[in-house]
Amino acid sequence: MKILMVSSEAVPFAKTGGLADAVSALSIALAKLGNEVKIVIPRYYNIDRTVLTPLEGEMGVPMGQGIEEWCAVHKTELPGSPATAPVEIFFIDHEIFFGRDGIYGTPFEPDFADNARRFTFFARAAFQLCSKIQWFPDVFHSHDWPSALVPVYLKYALRVGPLEKSVSVLTIHNLGYQGIYNKDTFSYTGLDWNVFYEGGFEDWNMLNMLKAGISSADRLNTVSEAYCAETKTGNYGCRLDGALRYRSEDYCGILNGVDTEVWNPQKDAYIPKHYSAADLKGKAAAKKALQKAFNLPENPDVPVLGMVTRLTGQKGVGELFGPSYGSAYSICKDMNLNFVMIGTGESWCEQELRHLSSELSNFKAQIGYSEKLGHLIEAGSDFFLMPSRYEPCGLNQMYSLAYGTLPIVRNTGGLADTVQNYDEASGGGTGFMFDDLTPQAIYNTVGWAMWAYHNRPEHIAAMRKRGMKHDFSWKGAAQKYIQMYEDAATDASKRMDV
Ligand code: ADP
Ligand code: GLC
């Protein structure tokens, strides 16, 4: 099949979170299974044009009201793609829309004022690209709100000529971000105003891009089965539970995989010594290096609790670090452990982390983004904490399992689908879980893990090995996506027969 991934992020070019990992890794896995895959993303300011190949000529993109925006297009081969089926990645280069710091915004302007216009342009540009390169996909695969208008354009305007049989798939990586803007930004789409209502844009007199994508895509999925079920409920649906229930026949959960070339203790370029389930000596070396990197005494007997996270409410940081509320302070005060972490995000939280680092000798937080430290924390920690309020899939708990680091997670979404709770009686399980998102529950569960570390070392050792043997490769997920594409194509051909 010919598949065009339309995304606002893809590693190694643009990343704010797991979406970027998922898009590139899935593309590679699909190519390895014999599909022809291309990706299109915006060319942001930090993407160096000089290492890309420019396409000849400019490209015009119609933006409604007779206006056309012009851009350049560049391309390159996605690193890591198979030699037999290279994945090409295209960059839409519009200086005014994308030649600035930040993908969706900056700390000072978290959601750029012109985002509706920027990402309407981007979705429309994906179609112009197909004409420009004379390559017409069977499947347009969009990801989250920034490319959610692709299914709308296909359904209501552009399923014609060489795209007559094309279908659209929308993957929801995070329902918490929907792209809600003023209604009059609809005029940038150039679509008939009837589509505003028929296409599902309407949201309390505002325009909701994700909602329009949900109502227009041929098939929908999210990134774990448990989150798929949760999103159809009022508690987790972020007001779109009704829209998702309405589409439930076409909506499923497909668990993300892990890029085993990058996140693999037997190959990891960032850790001092490679290791495997058969020989964990390298893990002890990583723990030592981690304690050193965070200026902690290099003590193999003190358990290390790690975190790598965006600092936002979704990740449970309020319950952990909320001033005079969160449990991180008591965890560090009461328990003989090292707590190390790296994260960026909401400024209150960054400030609180700096404060805790200065107050507590066993708590060390780095504010910032570092792949290297991310890898070292995964490898060198004994436990990894993810007390998420909601988690569509979550990659770090899977990385943790692969590195023999036991996840301590809330029982929700992708965390529930990937971690098995410890059973004291049998020693079974791969991590420690709790249900309620409260400071007390986090405190108790970390305490439970510490108890097992000291009193049931044989269980801990067996759990580490069990987790490391789990297969989280992308191949299985890619096969499920292919099935979804085929189902969408079958429906489309039935439609044409009518
Ligand atoms: P989300 O996409 O919701 O943030 P995921 O668990 O799916 O959560 O993916 C997060 C990804 O971003 C992981 O690859 C994680 O290692 C990485 N990451 C997040 N914050 C940082 C950071 N401060 N430094 C390094 N890597 C980070
Ligand atoms: C989102 C979700 C995360 C998921 C990632 C990749 O950022 O928050 O749970 O793993 O997308 O699908």
Image (cartoon, rainbow, N blue to C red):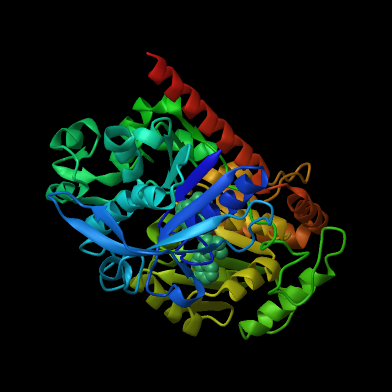
Q: Could you tell whether 441 is left or right of 28 in the image?
A: left
Q: Residue furthest top?
A: 498
- Choose between 494 and 220: the one closer to the eye: 494
Q: Residue at x 39, y 19 (%)?
A: 495
Q: Residue at x 80, y 57 (%)?
A: 461
Residue 77 in the image: above or below residue 411: below
Q: Position of residue 46 (x, y in %)?
A: 42, 75
Q: Position of residue 47 (x, y in %)?
A: 44, 72
Q: Residue furthest front?
A: 56
- Choose between 439 and 153: the one closer to the eye: 153
Q: Could you tell whether 352 is left or right of 117 in the image?
A: right
- Residue 48 appears in which quarter of the rendering? bottom left
Q: Position of residue 284 (x, y in %)?
A: 78, 72
State whether residue 336 appears in this view: no
- Choose between 278 and 480: the one closer to the eye: 480
Q: Could you tell whether 163 is left or right of 252 in the image?
A: left
Q: Residue furthest right?
A: 278
Q: Residue at x 77, y 59 (%)?
A: 455
Q: Could you tell whether 398 is left or right of 276 in the image?
A: left
Q: Residue at x 28, y 39 (%)?
A: 212
